[in-house]
Amino acid sequence: MNYEEDIKIDETSLDVEWLEQPKLFMRYARYAAETQKMFDLAKTNLDLVKAELDKAVREDPDKFGIEKLTETVVLNTILSLPEYKEANEKCINAKYEADIAKSAVRAFEQRKEALENLVRLHGQQYFAGPKIPRDLSFEVKQKEEQKRADRIVARVRRTT
């Protein structure tokens, strides 16, 4: 999936963009659900690893170099073990992916609103060109004549 490319709107073909919007939204909504599922599984695995390590530390504290078994010591030992660190990193990465996917879904909701507003503007002929072509040479000539008249008036005022 290419989020940056899919989010773009081609304002010259709003009809095609509207036809694509529901498909794109559904694709990203499904992806968000999948990444949320992966995060939930990673979180469950992290909890399981923590529980297993907790049990192992309590059953054989000497193996982990623990002299006095306290809750804080057990927790700190678990947090320092490679199995926990690996499961925690996977959980963090899965959460990151889920958050990005949720943001993409929100962006596609905003894309829908942008499409609605563009269609509204199009209906109000916001993008329409002028109906009567402008005669730029006439407008330039008129502006020059106005400037000349302004200079004459300014000279007259200075002399009086």
Image (cartoon, rainbow, N blue to C red):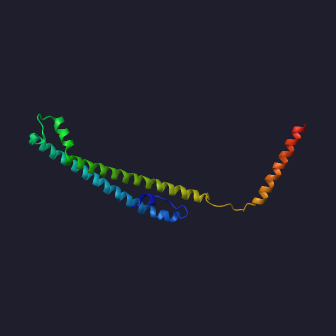
- The residue sitting at 45% across, 64% down in the picture is 20
| Residue 123 shows up from this direction | yes
Q: Is residue 57 left or right of residue 3?
A: left
Nearer-the-camera pick, 83 or 138: 83
Position of 58 relative to 42 (above/below)? above
Q: Is residue 61 left or right of residue 149?
A: left
Give the x, y percent position of residue 25.
Answer: 41, 59
Q: Is residue 60 left or right of residue 158?
A: left
Position of 58 relative to 97 (above/below)? above
Give the x, y percent position of residue 134.
Answer: 73, 60
Give the x, y percent position of residue 35.
Answer: 32, 55
- The residue sitting at 53% across, 55% down in the picture is 117
Give the x, y percent position of residue 12.
Answer: 55, 63
| Residue 47 shows up from this direction | no
- The residue sitting at 75% across, 59% down in the picture is 136
Nearer-the-camera pick, 79 or 103: 79
The quadrant in which the C terminus is found is: top right
Q: Quadrant of residue 57?
A: top left
